[in-house]
Image (cartoon, rainbow, N blue to C red):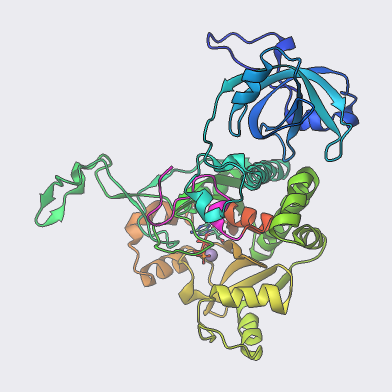
Amino acid sequence: METQRLQWHGKGSRVSIEEATTPIARVRDALNTDMVGQQVRVQGWVRTKRTSKAGVTFLEVNDGSGLRNLQIVVPESMPDYAAVVDAATTGASISASGMIIQSPAEGQETELRAESVEIVGSSPEYPLAKKRHSFEYLRTMAHLRPRTNTFGAVARVRNQVSWSIHRYFHEQGFLYVQTPIITGSDAEGAGQMFQVTSMDLKHLPVSEGLVDFSEDLFGRPTYLTVSGQLEAEIMATAMSSVYTFGPTFRAENSNTSRHLAEFWMVEPEVAFCDLDGLADLAEDFLKRIFSDVLNESAEDMAFFNQRIQPGIVESLERIANSDFVRLTYTEAIEVLQRSGRDFEFPVYWGADLQAEHERYLTEIQFDAPVILTDYPAEIKAFYMRLNPDGKTVAAMDVLVPGVGEIIGGSQREERYDVLLRRMKESGLDPEHYWWYLDLRRFGSVPHAGFGLGLERVVHFITGMQNIRDVIPFPRTPKNVEF
Ligand code: ATP
Ligand code: MN
């Protein structure tokens, strides 16, 4: 954990070290770090205020460094006591200096005995005072929800997971590459796309009844990317093992608890790798994320375990220490048909699996993460490698309890002729993908990759009910306020 946060003055000069601010999480932990008795300054936002009959005021303050608030004890003898205490209402930002002491009271190990408190910004009539608010309501208050326990914990776990992702791939020797957000490929096969244009939509240049895209900045239609995969393949067929980690956009009108219109996706792409190798990578990678978050965000995870989804810590521990179940799509269809369940969507070979089917497999049948492989070619993208049976492709999805699919990936078609045929069958114009085909002409290799939705994994880890509550500013149909 960082020890100090240096503040910046307006003129750009750093303040002296004596004026450095100590994160509240460190003050809370002072018994373990021998900091009791030290003089520190903390800065944060008031959660609650309570004044005792004896004329002492207790401020609960949080600065986002951890779940637990710091109790700041403000004695009546402090200069400006009455004015400061009056203004230190919920939501106010304060800067306080004093000594860390062992707390004589229940509820916290340490507290700060204030010698001075400065109100940095007052907050009369804070709208989220006291009572509990629903997550739906808090979505309408996304500018203040990070100040609640739940959303603070989500933000820290999300940060931990992002960091863990980078660390894992770095340790595995993957190269972090950036792929474009604006793309000219209009049919990557992953979902509905948002169009991007520099033209004035109120005065579109029209020629022969059609919009004339030669007037557009790029001289052709462009879109927000739905996946960095195709470009990641370019990089992988030179650099061997790469990953991208960036925003992705899907213009689907899906109002579910698992879909966002803008989300972050991690996409490793590995040359000289087949589907089995990819499944091994996915399993190892996920287990590492789970164990990292259990080790490094223990306090926040205990909160989710207690308040959001009882049992989540234990199930993550179990998952991190046992094998994922692996079976083919064809086997999964048989399991679903034998289940005797009355599914809303019919189960037959060739059907796309729905969330209800995925959740049956991972929650009821196996009670573990499941890696499903070898899907029918018709329901998967053109670039997935055709299996020898001619009917299925080397695709894989990783399913987890509570969420369903969190990873989708495949071994890519590396054979020029087969890829060309599959492209034409999918109604794509090979000329648009000349560069993608070229990779199969100049030193083609078996290669494979997957996409993991960051929000899906945070959704799973935290046990939050809705994916909109694991991204600070969710974009969903009719919702882009913040
Ligand atoms: P689903 O069937 O759940 O809609 P998908 O099969 O369309 O997902 P892929 O194209 O395989 O998704 O994308 C790879 C991964 O990106 C998914 O496994 C998931 O983790 C994540 N993902 C896909 N769509 C979304 C979305 N709309 N919101 C959040 N995450 C998503
Ligand atoms: Mn998928």
Residue located at (76% from left, 25% from top): 55
Q: Position of residue 199 (x, y in %)?
A: 22, 42
Q: Is residue 476 magenta?
A: yes
Which stretch appears magenta? 465-482
| Residue 365 as seen in the image, left or right of residue 373 | right
Whether residue 233 appears in this view of the structure is no
Q: Residue furthest front?
A: 53
Q: Quadrant of residue 120?
A: top right
Q: Is residue 76 magenta?
A: no
Residue 344 position (above or below residue 133): below
Whether residue 23 appears in this view of the structure is yes
| Residue 356 as seen in the image, left or right of residue 482 | right
**For the C terminus, which image quadrant?**
top left
Residue located at (12% from left, 50% from top): 206
Nearer to us in this view, 202 or 84 = 84
Residue located at (63% from left, 73% from top): 359
Residue 179 position (above or below residue 306): above
Nearer to us in this view, 87 or 202 = 87
| Residue 218 as seen in the image, left or right of residue 151 | left
Q: Residue furthest left?
A: 208
**For the N terminus, which image quadrant?**
top right
Nearer to us in this view, 36 or 355 = 36
Query: What secondary structure is the magenta-colored segment mainly?
Result: loop
Nearer to us in this view, 430 or 41 = 41
Residue 191 position (above or below residue 365): above
Q: Position of residue 439 (x, y in %)?
A: 48, 53
Q: Position of residue 10 (x, y in %)?
A: 53, 12
Residue 275 position (above or below residue 358): above
How many marks overall?
0
Q: Position of residue 401 (x, y in %)?
A: 67, 68
